[in-house]
Image (cartoon, grey):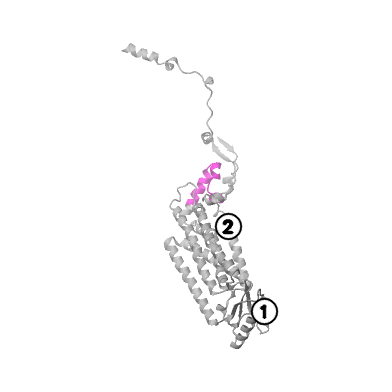
Amino acid sequence: MSVTTAAPPVSPRRRHTLRDLYHERTSFHFIERSWRWAILSGSIILISAIAFAASGLNLGIDFEGGTQWQFTSKAGSVSSNGVRDVLGKLGLGDAKVLIVGGDAVRVQSKDLTPALQAKVTAALAKYGRIDAAQVSLTNVGPTWGDKVSSKALKALVVFFLVIALYLTVRFEWRMAVAAIIAVIHDILITVGVYAITGFEVTPATVVAFLTILGFSLYDTVVVFDKVKDNQARLGTVRGDTYSSMVNRSMNQVLMRSINTSLVALLPVASLLFVGTYLFGGLTLRDFALALFVGLLTGAYSSIFVATPILAWLKEREPKYRALRARAQSDLARAPRGVVAEAPAEVRAEAPDEMVVVEEQVNVAAVESAAPPRPPRPPSARPVTQSPTAASPRPRQQRRRKRR
């Protein structure tokens, strides 16, 4: 005999508050919605690739070679058009002109003869109402740019090898692969930002690249270390899977990651906006922009890129595939109320009929799960007790007669 019961509605997910975030009581479904983060990251990388293919990078003089003038005008606010008019009279209308803070000027052009360099220096000094000695002149050959580029690539390759070796020894090779993919993700997005904005790429930018790679890996290692701690207790909870354990680990370190990212971004933001636009430090801008974009993308990739990739790789292992199959089997046998509280990653992969259809359960199971019946009032109970059982005196009298 069976009884058909309608599936009760699943309770809506609770909205989190700032208090939950502060006290680390969140339960965001990072792994369940990893396809959203994949679409977001893929779209940004695609835009970056299109911008890089269309316009390329604005390589600085250190990479291409040439002549650079830099000065601070005392004539008040200056404009790039005004500087170009001065340079156009000398046949340098295609020179790069950068104005920062309203009075700091940087001009870059191809290699010039010493005589023409002197004429440009005098014209710029006259435009800025300063002495010619106050105009900084720098000559960089193309061989210097080639050396800088080759050394930057070598440093990047060595960095990847050392980090991959360390993460493999400290954790495992799957975590190393996930971390390296997240770092490459950060580099591609940062390069895309430079390609879209047209900001100049200088050796300071390369230094900032290496710096952001270290920060991105630091935040990733924090998450992976928590995953490794929770991995030892995996399987002790019914219906638990590797993905749900990873999701739980990310919620436990979410506030730590946010605090670390904010503490790192605030001084970089002050370096970028205050140091560049208030004090006119052009070199600071080249370094701080790459650092700011890299730190921001690194904080994002450690949670939304590296960890979902790790969960995807680990779920391919036979041990964790069996654990997921057992969790889905428990989900199939559980009543509807238990199904609603199963891990979200397991529910997402369960068939629809497992969650939504009406279930048939045994009468014994229904009776055992049903609430107990209320007791009858005392007046309605039948009197079944005999006088002998009601009073102990007849029993005591028989004992006396035997004695």
Badge 1 marks a residue whose secondary structure is helix
Q: Quadrant of residue 201?
A: bottom right
Q: Residue under circle 1?
A: 84
Question: Which segment is the magenta one?
Answer: 323-348
Q: Residue 344, can we see it?
A: no
Q: Residue under circle 2?
A: 35
Furthest-left residue in this view: 403
Q: Position of residue 135 (x, y in %)?
A: 59, 80
Q: Position of residue 90 (x, y in %)?
A: 66, 85
Figure disc tally = 2
Q: Position of residue 280 (x, y in %)?
A: 59, 71
Q: Residue at position x 45%, y 68% from top?
A: 162
Alpha carbons under labels 2 and 1: distance apart: 49 Å
Q: Residues within 10 Å of mark 1 (few under 14, many from 20)?
A: some
Dominant SS of magenta comes to: helix
Q: Nearer the viewer, mark 2 or mark 1?
A: 1
Q: Quadrant of the N terminus?
A: top right
Q: Quadrant of residue 114?
A: bottom right
Furthest-top residue in this view: 401
Instruction: Identify which amino acid the numbered label 2 is placed on.
Output: Trp
Q: Earlier in the sequence, mark 2 or mark 1?
A: 2
Q: Residue at position x 67%, y 79% from top?
A: 84
